[in-house]
Image (cartoon, helix red, strand yellow):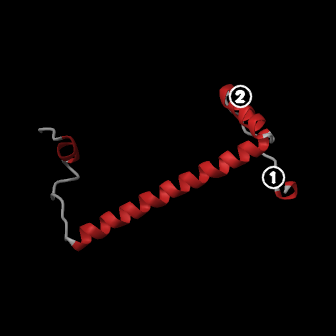
Amino acid sequence: MKSNLVPTTVYVQPELKRTVREVARKRRCTDAEVIREALAAGLEHLKNQQEASLTGLKALIQFAETHQAKGPDDLSQNLDKYLWNEAE
C-alpha cells in the first residue's frame, strides 16, 4: 500500500497528536494509519453533509416552484425587517 501514498506534512495541536498516538497504541498500528483513516472518515462525513445540504436546497426550490411561492416585492430593501422582525 505504501507505493501509492503521497507524503504530506500536517501540523496539529499537541492534544490531537496525543490522541492519535493513544488510538494507534490501542489498535497496535502506526500514527499514520490512524491519521489516514480519520482523514478519510472525516472527508466522507463532510461530503455527505454537503450532498445533504444540496438535496435539501433542491427540494426547497422544487417546493417553491410547485406552489408558485413568491416573496414580498421589497425583500431586498427590507431584508432585516423580514428576517428579524425589525420595525423601520
Q: Residue 5 location in percent, x, y?
A: 81, 54
Asked whether, in this view, residue 28 is left or right of residue 48, the answer is right
Vertical relation: 14 (above or below) 23: above
Asked whether, in this view, residue 1 is left or right of residue 59, the answer is right
Vertical relation: 55 (above or below) 23: below
Quarter location, residue 68: bottom left
Label 1 belongs to which residue? Answer: 6
Residue type at numbered disc 2: Arg
Q: Nearer the viewer, residue 52 or 79?
A: 52
Residue type at numbered disc 1: Val
Label 2 belongs to which residue? Answer: 18
Quarter location, residue 31: top right
Residue at disc 2, secondary structure: helix
Q: Residue 75 location in percent, x, y?
A: 20, 53
Q: Residue 41 location in percent, x, y?
A: 62, 51
Vertical relation: 65 (above or below) 41: below
Q: Earlier in the sequence, mark 2 or mark 1?
A: 1
Label 2 neighbourhood size at 10 Å, few (<14), some (14-19), many (20+)?
few
In percent of the image, x 71 and y 28: which residue is there? 18
Residue at disc 1, secondary structure: loop
Asked whether, in this view, residue 43 is left or right of residue 52, the answer is right
